[in-house]
Image: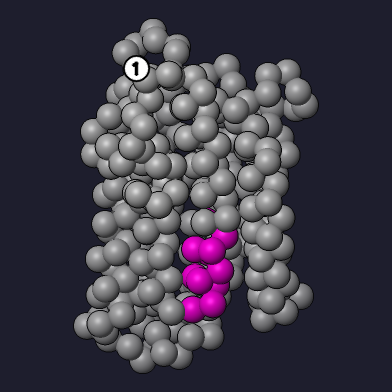
């Protein structure tokens, strides 16, 4: 089967996963981390599962991208660099910075993540290096590319700052949860999710392709209900939780 034939199939798969995950996550929190259901079903080591489920996003992207006729053009190469900026860290660095936990990754969650990251890496790379002539002919001074890049790195900074706050929240040996403070935690419970949404909104603006738009919508369909679940959990667990905080969007939700 050719890449051109696989492309619409993979894109439909992503849309279907997003359409199913949004209503499901509104009522059933993703079963890992603080929402893990211990001893239910098959579970995998969290760090290993994270590495294996995120790795297809950069690996498949690079392989498919390199096969495209626009792979040597400046703007597609720049978008490749943006993609790898996020996913090399998220796939091969972040798992080893995670705290050890007895709440491992459910097998079904792992398999769905592998399917999504494989399909998503494929469709975004294919659109950028195979079909998007507007990117092949664009320059690095394109206003849309510049604006999208600024937005991408703003979200990237928010995401990393928020993750660092969570990572240093507990001292060695601590096992309980605490209320995070500082940065955008002043206004929302999940600024790390907000940062990731901003990242991919910037990427979608910079790339201006259908898969990039579908990706940011899929990201929202997953992260918004997860942020709402986290926010509700914080409020139930901590009676003194800051009342002014929203779940993910300051002053709104």
Side of 58 relative to 166 (left or right): right
Q: Look at the magenta stretch and give its main secondary structure.
A: helix
- Look at 65% across and 63% down and name the residue there: 14
- Look at 49% across and 42% down and name the residue there: 227
Side of 141 relative to 178 (left or right): left
Q: Is residue 93 in view from this perspective?
A: no
Image coordinates of residue 90 in percent, x first then y, are 43, 45
Q: Is residue 236 in view from this perspective?
A: yes
The quarter holding residue 79 reads: bottom left
Side of 234 relative to 111 (left or right): left
Q: Nearer the viewer, residue 248 or 214?
A: 248
Image coordinates of residue 3 in percent, x first then y, are 66, 76
Q: Is residue 214 magenta?
A: yes
Quadrant including the N terminus:
bottom right
Residue at label 1? 170
Relative vertical location of residue 225 with respect to residue 140 in this rendering, above or below? above
The quarter holding residue 244 reads: top left
Q: Is residue 17 magenta?
A: no
Density class for disc 1 (Cα within 10 Å; few <14, some 14-19, many ≥20) is some
Type of colouring: one colour
Q: Nearer the viewer, residue 240 or 25?
A: 240
- Look at 68% across and 19% down and name the residue there: 38
| Residue found farthest to the front | 243
Q: Which residues are magenta?
A: 209-219
Mark count: 1
Q: Secondary structure at mark 1?
A: loop
Image coordinates of residue 235 in percent, x first then y, are 47, 27
Image coordinates of residue 218 in percent, x first then y, are 57, 60
- Look at 64% across and 58% down and name the residue there: 18
């Amino acid at each position: 089967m050719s890449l051109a034939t696989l492309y619409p199939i993979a894109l439909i798969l992503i849309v279907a996963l997003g359409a199913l995950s949004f209503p499901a996550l509104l009522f059933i929190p993703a079963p890992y981390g603080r929402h893990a259901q211990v001893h239910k079903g098959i579970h995998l080591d969290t760090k290993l599962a994270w590495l294996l489920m995120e790795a297809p996003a950069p690996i498949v992207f690079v392989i498919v991208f390199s096969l495209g006729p626009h792979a040597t053009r400046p703007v597609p190469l720049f978008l490749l660099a943006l993609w790898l900026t996020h996913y090399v860290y998220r796939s091969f660095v972040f798992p080893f910075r995670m705290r050890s936990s007895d709440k491992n990754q459910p097998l079904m969650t792992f398999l769905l993540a592998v399917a999504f990251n494989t399909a998503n890496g494929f469709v975004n790379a294919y659109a950028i290096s195979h079909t998007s002539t507007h990117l092949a002919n664009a320059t690095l001074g394109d206003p849309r590319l510049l604006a999208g890049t600024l937005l991408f790195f703003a979200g990237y900074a928010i995401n990393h700052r928020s993750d660092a706050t969570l990572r240093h929240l507990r001292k060695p040996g601590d096992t309980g949860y605490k209320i995070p403070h500082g940065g955008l935690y002043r206004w929302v419970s999940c600024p790390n999710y907000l940062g990731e949404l901003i990242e991919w909104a910037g990427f979608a603006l910079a790339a201006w392709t259908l898969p990039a738009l579908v990706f940011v919508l899929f990201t929202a369909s997953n992260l918004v209900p997860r942020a709402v679940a986290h926010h509700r959990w914080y409020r139930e667990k901590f009676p003194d939780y800051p009342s002014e905080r929203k779940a993910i969007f300051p002053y709104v939700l």
